[in-house]
Image (tube, grey):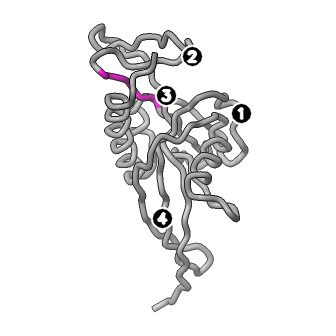
Amino acid sequence: MERYQTLRAYSAGGVVFRLAPVCSPENHLVKKAQHDSRELVPDSNGSARMDVVLVGRSHSGIWALPKGTPQSGETIEQVAVREAQEETGLQVQLIAYIGSITYSFVRERVRYQKQVRHFLLKAIGGDVALHDHEYDRVEWFSLPEACRHLTYQNEVNILYQAEEMLQRWLQYRPQEG
């Protein structure tokens, strides 16, 4: 039996979202009157459609959530924000911790046990055209489309958790204005 050295690795990233208009009249979003007039907020029913950004590699056909490795001295929250901003080109605001996924892989006779901590991140500026070179595709998707595109089921599960968390956040956050 072949033996591998085992290393534990950690990274962080998240679900970068924006609120988008919903087509049905009873679930439409209205423009926010104060602050940024382009920001959409849920209607009085608290309904909102969440669009999420995915990062991809054309040559391998992989679509994923943005994530990456800590730099010296960074908190896990700082890693999530930095990696999301670098990989998507968007400015993000950390909303809440979603959860973590764990998986393992082997590279050059080393087995890595990796844990990725995911956060809910609101897009507040930037442009997907400004993403770094790590991925060659960065695109917005509706939640159902994102679930169909994601390569890994554990990230699909994180998306569903993010959707539930976003709906609670929208319902219970203090009303502005």
Q: Residues within 10 Å of mark 4 (few under 14, many from 20)?
A: some
Is the residue under label 4 in contact with that under label 2 (CB below 8 Å)? no
Q: Which residue is mark 1?
A: 130
Position of residue 81 measured from the top left corner of the image (x, y, whole percent): 60, 46
At 62% from the left and 60% from the top, the residue drawn is 69
Q: Which mark is residue 18?
A: 3
Of the image marks 2 and 4, the number of the one nearer the N terminus:
2
* Mark 3: secondary structure: strand
Q: Report, in whole angstroms, how far the alpha carbon at label 1 lies from the one at label 4.
A: 27 Å
* Mark 4: secondary structure: strand
Of the image marks 3 and 1, the number of the one nearer the N terminus:
3
- Depth check, mark 3 against mark 1: the one in front is 3
Q: Which residue is mark 2?
A: 35
* In magenta stretch: residue 18: no
Task: Indicate left or right for 168 with 92 as reference.
Answer: left
Count numbered badges in the picture: 4
Q: Report, in whole angstroms, how far the alpha carbon at label 3 lies from the one at label 1.
A: 17 Å
Q: Which residue is mark 4?
A: 115
* Mark 2: secondary structure: loop
Q: Which residues are magenta?
A: 46-51
Q: Report, in whole angstroms, how far the alpha carbon at label 1 lies from the one at label 2.
A: 24 Å
Q: Which kind of residue does numbered mark 1 sit on?
A: Leu
Task: Indicate left or right for 15 with 88 as reference.
Answer: left
* Mark 1: secondary structure: helix
